[in-house]
Image: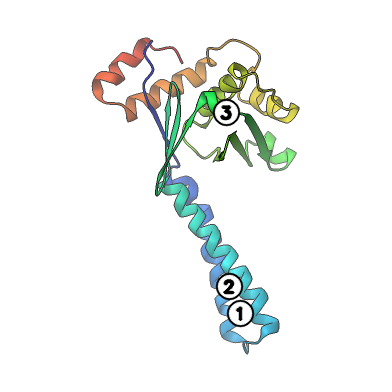
Amino acid sequence: MSETTRTLRYPPGTLIGDYLRAAFGVAVGACVLALNPIGWGLGVPVGGLMLLFAGFGVRTAMRQMTRVEVQADGLIVHTLTARPLTWQAVTAVRLRYYGSKRERKAEGGFYQLKLQAPGARFSFESGLTGFDYLVWRAGEAARANGRPLDTSTVHNMQAFGIDPDGTLAPPPAIAARAREIARTSAPAHDANACSGERG
């Protein structure tokens, strides 16, 4: 099957919690400074925390702007600029889970995928639509490039039903997700061609 471009995004609904946390942190800091005499002893730490939360809000906004185009030969990350990465250039793939064991059983917490290439690093979180498909493509690139995966990455890939050392075809659920993404991101004639596409 021909390879079409899959466009992945962070749905705004998945970012609302991060926006609220950023706004809450800035608001609390502003209230503390407004209700207390401003001095170095209070202004520096509270101001620093406000900047930290404001930076988190900016980072969340950048994620909302992010568009990831996954193609046969690599991907392009669009934010304020376009950053390309070819699969052949990938030198390291790491998949980490952040959350407690209880959250993991309840499908809470989140995963973070990191890709490394000469002079470039890319990071994606599991709120990204089609994140599992991106994980599969990253594992395929690591295998094709002869790059070993650490134990934690292998374990986390298996949690998605992906066997890094197994078949090149993605699991059925991921293949179905890829076709869904292709239908919503590709022109009509490309989307129709995806019905017979592999992974």
Separation (CA) of disc 2 from disc 1: 6 Å
**Closer to the camera, 39 or 21?**
39
Does residue 93 lie above or below 100 as drawn? above
- Is residue 158 left or right of 24 when viewed as pictured? right
Q: Between 140 and 24, which is closer to the camera in this rendering?
A: 140
Q: Which of marks 3 and 1 is nearer the N terminus?
A: 1
Determine the secondary structure under disc 3: loop
Q: How crowded is mark 2: few (under 14 residues within 10 Å), some or many (20 or more)?
A: some
**In contact (CB < 8 Å): disc 3 and disc 1:** no
* Residue at x-position 69% and y-position 43%: 99
x, y percent for residue 35: 59, 86
Residue 32 has which mark? 1
Residue 28's disc is 2
Q: What element carries label 1?
A: helix
Q: Mark 3 and mark 2: span between their CA atoms?
A: 42 Å
**Label 3 neighbourhood size at 10 Å, few (<14), some (14-19), many (20+)?**
many
Residue type highlighted by circle 3:
Val
3 or 2: tag closer to the N-terminus: 2
Residue at the spot of label 3:
90
Residue that appears at 71% across and 26% down:
155
Using residue 103 as the reference point, say whether residue 23 is left or right of it: left
